[in-house]
Image (cartoon, grey):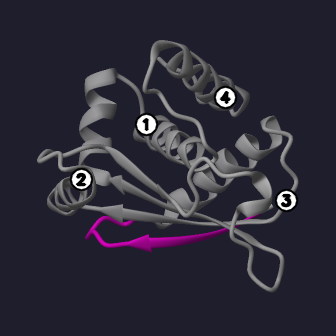
């Protein structure tokens, strides 16, 4: 129940990955028992761009793989922004394609699996999950693995 806007700011052809990310997002919402209508954007960016974003918003001057910006933060469900069509806008997920490709090689699995992981990670952040302490990290990472395993996107 997602409306996903894909924006490609890179030179890479990412058109074949929209179905993958849509499947990951749908599985995430299913496992979260969430049947509301949501809107989210996924933006593919370069290393330079994600480094700028990371510095501007987090004051961390380095490249990262994924950054999410939720339109709400620690609010009640009823406070989430809805438009007149009753669609809840969650926020934006920025994925660094160069970093995704490097990490797929480093971790020894496919680009498809790594991109699915980053998209899932980003969406879970938009849904309020975080990994600032070991307990929260264990919960979030277990959810990621459950979602990816359900889609047969296992680690290799």
Question: Regarding mark 1 in the picture, which secondary structure is present there?
Answer: helix
Question: Regarding mark 2 in the picture, which secondary structure is present there?
Answer: helix
Residue denoted by label 4:
152
Q: With 30 as the anchor, is 15 left or right in this view?
A: left
Q: Give the residues drawn in magenta, as a range.
A: 2-13
Question: Regarding mark 4 in the picture, which secondary structure is present there?
Answer: loop
Q: Distance between the residues labelled 4 and 3?
A: 25 Å
Please say if the residues under marks 2 and 4 sit with CB atoms less than 8 Å apart.
Answer: no
Q: How far apart are marks 1 and 4 (CA)?
A: 13 Å
In this view, 106 is above or below 51: above
Q: How far apart are marks 3 and 2 (CA)?
A: 30 Å
Question: Which is nearer the N-term, disc 2 or disc 4?
Answer: 2
Question: Which is nearer the N-term, disc 4 or disc 3?
Answer: 3
Residue denoted by label 2:
54
Question: Which is nearer the N-term, disc 1 or disc 2?
Answer: 2
Front residue of 108/7: it is 7
Residue denoted by label 3:
36
Numbered disc total:
4
Give the residue drawn at x 47%, y 13%.
Answer: 134
* Coordinates of residue 30 in the picture (x, y in percent): 82, 42
In this view, 69 is above or below 85: above
Question: Which is nearer the N-term, disc 3 or disc 1?
Answer: 3
Q: Which of marks 3 and 1 is in front?
A: 3
Let me know if residue 3 is in the magenta part. Answer: yes
Q: How far apart are marks 2 and 4 (CA)?
A: 31 Å
Label of residue 114 in the image:
1
Give the residue drawn at x 58%, y 36%.
Answer: 129
Pointer 1 local density, CA inside 10 Å: few below 14, some 14–19, many at least 20? many
In this view, 51 is above or below 31: below
């Amino acid at each position: 129940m997602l409306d996903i806007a894909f924006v490609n700011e890179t030179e890479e052809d990412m058109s074949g990955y929209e179905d993958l990310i849509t499947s990951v997002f749908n599985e995430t919402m299913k496992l979260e028992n969430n049947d509301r209508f949501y809107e989210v954007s996924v933006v593919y960016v370069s290393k330079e761009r994600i480094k700028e974003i990371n510095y501007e918003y987090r004051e961390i001057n380095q490249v990262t793989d994924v950054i999410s910006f939720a339109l709400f933060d620690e609010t009640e469900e009823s406070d989430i922004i809805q438009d007149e069509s009753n669609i809840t806008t969650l926020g934006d997920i920025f994925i660094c394609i160069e970093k995704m490709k490097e990490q797929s090689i480093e971790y020894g699995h496919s680009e498809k699996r790594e991109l699915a992981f980053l998209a899932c990670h980003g969406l879970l952040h938009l849904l309020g999950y975080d990994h600032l302490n070991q307990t929260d990290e264990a919960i979030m990472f277990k959810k990621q693995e459950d979602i990816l395993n359900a889609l047969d996107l296992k680690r290799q």
